[in-house]
Amino acid sequence: MTENYLPVLIFVGIASIMGLIPLLLGLKLGPRKADAAKDSPYECGFEAFEDARMQFDVRYYLVAILFIIFDLEIAFLFPWAVSIREVGLIGFVSMAIFLIILTIGFIYEWKKGALDWD
């Protein structure tokens, strides 16, 4: 049984080593100059200028929801499209229901104005 997993374990081991070597070389050979700009906290590329509890525009959250809608759609649509013959009619109906739910979310975004570029 373990001989089936041996190639996978060898692959994971080699991939881990090949991923760790550049990291260790960078730590060992890279410059370590402390810089005030590098050590300062930032968010979204600029200095924080107000309280952490300030209100955000609702469009910020709507864009985040829109990203999640399209991200979920793509993440589930590709495997479904590849295996459409194996899943049959039940798989088709379940994906149709899933796409209808995502379309409802998209319409909500559209009505709230998340797609308007001001």
Image (cartoon, rainbow, N blue to C red):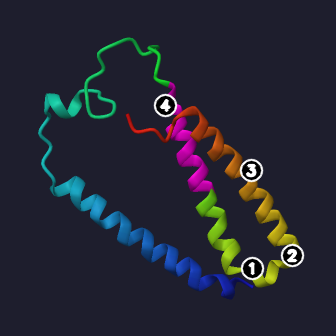
Mark 2: give few (<14), some (14-19) or many (20+) Cα within 10 Å.
few
Mark 2 secondary-structure assignment: helix
Circle 3: residue type: Ile
Q: Nearer the viewer, residue 29 or 73?
A: 73
Q: Earlier in the sequence, mark 1 or mark 2?
A: 1
> Would you say 49 lies left or right of 107 here?
left
3 or 1: mark nearer the eye: 3
- Residue 23: give x, y in percent of width and height: 30, 59
Circle 1: residue type: Ile
Chief secondary structure of the magenta portion: helix
**Residue in view at x 33 percent, y 34 percent:** 44
* Mark 2 and mark 4: Cα distance apart in space: 38 Å
Q: Quadrant of the C terminus?
A: top left
Q: Which residue is mark 3?
A: 101
Q: Earlier in the sequence, mark 2 or mark 3?
A: 2
- Residue 100: give x, y in percent of width and height: 75, 54
Q: Which residue is mark 4?
A: 59
Q: Which residue is mark 1?
A: 84
1 or 4: mark nearer the eye: 4
Q: Earlier in the sequence, mark 1 or mark 4?
A: 4
* Mark 3 and mark 1: Cα distance apart in space: 20 Å
Circle 2: residue type: Leu
Question: Which residue range is magenta in the image?
Answer: 58-72
**Residue in view at x 87 percent, y 75 percent:** 89
**Residue in view at x 29 percent, y 16 percent:** 49
**Residue in view at x 11 percent, y 39 percent:** 33
| Residue 117, numbered label | none
* Mark 1 and mark 2: Cα distance apart in space: 9 Å
Q: Which residue is mark 2?
A: 89
- Residue 110: give x, y in percent of width and height: 58, 41
Circle 4: residue type: Arg
